[in-house]
Amino acid sequence: MTLLRRLRRRLLRADPDHGIELLVRMVTAPSTSAERALLAAVERDLAEPAAKGADAGAPRTEPAPEAGVVLVIRIPALPRWDAAVPGPVLSAVVRPVLADRVTAVLGPLFPIQLGGDGRDLVVSMWPSHLDDLPSALRALTAGLSEPFSLGGKQAVVQPQFGLAPVVTTEEDAIAVARVGLPETSVLRWTAEAAPGTRAVTGLLAELTAARAALAAGKFTLLHKHIRRVDRFTVAGTRAIPAWTDETGEARPLDVLGDLADATRLSHHVLDHTLPALGHDLALWHTAGRGPEDPDLFCLLDVSEQILRDRYLSEELPAALQRSAAPPELFVLGIPHTALSDVAGIDAHLAELHGLGVGLALTGYGHPDTPLSVLARHPWRLLVIRSDIVGTLAEYSTKDLPPPANCSEEKKRADREEFRKTVIPNALIRTARALGIQLLAEDTTIGTARHGLGRGDDLHTTPHGNPVTAAGITANQLWRGPADAEPGPSLGLPAQRGLPGAAQ
């Protein structure tokens, strides 16, 4: 990577306007013999002095910290090949395919964001975690070009992407990487899909099922626990809008990904979610909170599109007025990408905070994200990505409660794991100084339907919320099934005709 960085500097000095574009083309797919020869010559020119200096016993200096690299992948704007499925919906179907292929090549370490009003996939990379960036980019080009099945046709994307180092801020690097990119990538397809190509039309089937279920009133609201990263204790719950499929299984809206926003289904679901959540919070507040649980809340994630449309400004005040629960029990999860991608976001968040609700910054944990975003708004919570929660360097094992029957070997392994970090310690210190509570984002929802009780079968209240037939206690709700203790009943009514319900 040091070689590549020096190569970049030399190319920029030679051609400031097109140096980065030339670098990307040269390391990914040199198109001419002259480019290949130039790349080889520059590599030799840069490598030989370093080798001679090492042989002569020249003093070695510590390398400078690796800067981040931003990769921007332009998403195809699909034409209307089928009048029943609009182009923006098809674009939303293709996004997860491209994101999966980026993850397959680069691994799960690097976060992938949607940027440019849905036109780009933005991949934030750290060169120190890549053995060979040029090889990775060549593999990425090949991976993105593999065909997949779309509506019975074979689709092939001709990838277009830009690359730029993070010199000042990631936002500036993204702007540089977008320079010279076309408005859209090229997508080609044939009449029939080739055997063995990946089908993505399952998402369209999910969308159809979700619309039918919601039209039939089969809306439900799942809750799962969300925990503190420093004590591994439950801090509150996360609300997950869902629908009930024909088998009776709850399907979270998250499975639709960007489709929920592209079809405005997320807006429709929010109309159901806010009253249902207000009803739940009113019941929990009436049941009372113990002195050991002063900061209970329910976190509701909102998407960039919801924020962009200012939808909450219209719906949230009425929901708060109908609910008997204090507004501070509501916490809105704001994706950290919205701070740069949504116009006027600062004024909108100030407006929402003025209603009395809490604000949580979600998906945070990227080392190159400026810490200044923590001071821009009165964040109550900082929700850190789950894949890196276990590597927070600020917390050593002595700060954590030791697990029961934990061997010394396991403790040593834990200590080693905590020493490996991809989050600056400044993140922890800044959040603590601002009084922001640190929480762990749980990316799995397999236990969400059993998160409110002791694993009892869940039933549905008249407005669609899952509850246990025996009711839920406040201590069960907030502490979790493993260490639940008897507490005041929430008094949720059992529905007639359900197993275990009072007849």
Image (tube, rainbow, N blue to C red):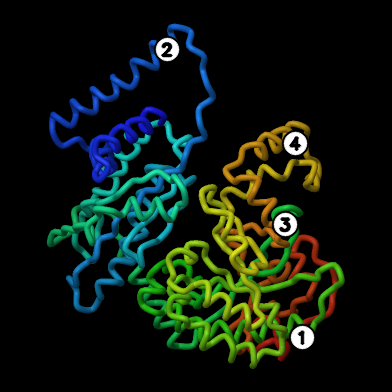
Nearer to us: label 4 or label 1: 4
Which residue is painted at 30% across and 32% down in the image?
10
**Helix or strand or loop: what does disc 2 sit on?**
helix
Which residue is painted at 64% across and 67% down in the image?
379
Sequence-first tag of 4 and 2: 2
Residue 115: percent from left, percent from top:
39, 61
- Estimate how packed mark 3 is, as few (under 14), some (14 to 19) or many (20 or more) residues with alpha carbons within 10 Å: few
Sequence-first tag of 4 and 1: 4
Residue type of the residue flagged with mark 1: Gly
Nearer to us: label 3 or label 4: 3
Nearer to us: label 2 or label 1: 2
Sequence-first tag of 1 and 3: 3
Tag 1 residue: 491
Q: Which of 306 and 153 is in front in this view?
A: 306
Q: Which mark is residue 53?
A: 2
Residue type of the residue flagged with mark 4: Lys
**Helix or strand or loop: what does disc 4 sit on?**
helix
Is 367 placed left or right of 207 in the picture? Answer: right
Sequence-first tag of 3 and 4: 4
How far is the residue under mark 4 from the one under mark 2?
44 Å
How far is the residue under mark 1 from the one under mark 3?
40 Å
Tag 3 residue: 433
Which residue is painted at 65% across and 48% down in the image?
426
The answer to whether marks 4 and 1 mark residues whose Cβ atoms lie closer than 8 Å is no
Nearer to us: label 1 or label 3: 3
